[in-house]
Image (spheres, helix red, strand yellow):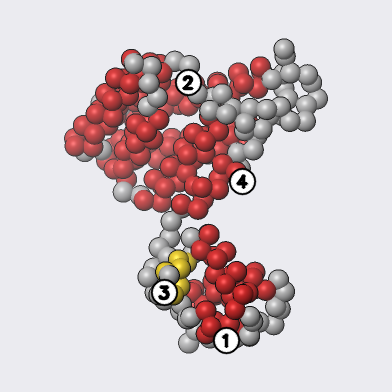
């Protein structure tokens, strides 16, 4: 039998203790998305703390995406989502260009390690979807327009054949981080036609079911992004640079 909620032995800091107790309660009872938690008053009584502490703990769990508060209805377990991670990654891990490079490296490793399975699983309909996205990129690139939405959809569609929702969420998270800092750090591509051609080359390789060629072209695509990061560092003379593109603590002066 799962343990019931008990008065807390270590009430300080109370809001953190409440969070931990509620997490244990959800896990012990194997609660699923949509399952209700006891009322605020009941939680306060069973935990032996004030309702304000319960309210703070619940609010913190809500911000993390663990529970949701339905006005007039109570507190419910929320379906797992990487939404909170998506929102916080740019602030938590993308504070310097080096951290941006680290995130990009992880994303590249994920894609390269799984691209073989994706290529071999791609259906004719999925290939058509990829080609349509690349076509839309080409039209916008020719007009000098931004095609970030199509770029994100492309990488999502590239790995859609695997049917791995967690992977797609992680790739979205890493893409989102890079997009958030690309503008302020001046990392956007200066050659949209070249970026479009990179994606076109990847699709052609997928269409040929040539795994080795797809890996090479995907690597070349990432090499271009990494190159922009390296160029940005060089322009700042080796200074430590935050994600806004501003020099932080530097051991060498930035070039004029």
Mark toward the start of the polypeptide (4 vs 1):
1
Residue at figure coordinates x 19%, y 37% from the top left: 125
Mark toward the start of the polypeptide (2 vs 3):
3
In the image, residue 167 above or below residue 9: above
Residue 49: image location, x then y, percent: 64, 81
In the image, residue 148 above or below residue 5: above
Q: Secondary structure at mark 2?
A: loop
The tag on residue 141 is: none
Q: Which residue is mark 1?
A: 46
Mark toward the start of the polypeptide (4 vs 2):
4
* Left or right for 251, reference 66: right
- Contact (CB < 8 A) between labels 4 and 2? no
Q: How many other residues sit within 10 Å of disc 4, few (<14), some (14-19) or many (≥20)?
A: few
Q: Which residue is mark 3?
A: 72
Mark toward the start of the polypeptide (3 vs 1):
1
Q: How many other residues sit within 10 Å of disc 1, few (<14), some (14-19) or many (≥20)?
A: some
Residue 175: image location, x then y, percent: 46, 37
Rounded to the nearest angstrom, the CA distance separating label 2 from label 1 is 57 Å
Work out which residue is located at the far right of the displayed protein and give it.
Answer: 251
Residue at figure coordinates x 48%, y 87% from the top left: 1
């Amino acid at each position: 039998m799962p343990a019931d909620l008990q008065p807390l032995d270590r009430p300080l800091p109370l809001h953190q203790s409440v969070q931990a107790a509620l997490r244990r309660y959800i896990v012990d009872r194997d609660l699923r998305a949509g399952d209700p938690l006891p009322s605020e008053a009941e939680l306060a009584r069973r935990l032996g703390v004030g309702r304000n502490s319960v309210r703070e703990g619940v609010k913190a769990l809500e911000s993390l995406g663990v529970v949701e508060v339905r006005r007039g209805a109570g507190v419910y377990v929320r379906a797992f989502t990487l939404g909170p991670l998506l929102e916080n990654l740019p602030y938590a891990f993308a504070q310097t260009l080096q951290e941006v490079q680290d995130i990009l490296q992880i994303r590249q490793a994920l894609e390269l390690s799984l691209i073989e399975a994706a290529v071999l699983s791609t259906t004719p309909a999925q290939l058509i979807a990829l080609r349509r996205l690349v076509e839309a990129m080409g039209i916008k690139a020719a007009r000098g327009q931004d095609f970030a939405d199509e770029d994100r959809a492309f990488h999502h569609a590239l790995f859609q054949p695997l049917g791995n929702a967690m992977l797609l969420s992680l790739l979205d998270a890493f893409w989102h981080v890079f997009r958030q800092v690309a503008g302020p750090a001046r990392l956007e591509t200066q050659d949209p036609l070249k970026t479009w051609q990179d994606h076109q080359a990847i699709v052609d390789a997928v269409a040929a079911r040539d795994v080795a060629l797809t890996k090479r072209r995907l690597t070349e695509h990432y090499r271009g992004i990494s190159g922009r990061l390296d160029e940005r560092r060089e322009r700042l003379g080796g200074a430590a640079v935050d994600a806004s593109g501003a020099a932080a603590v530097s051991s060498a002066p930035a070039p004029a």
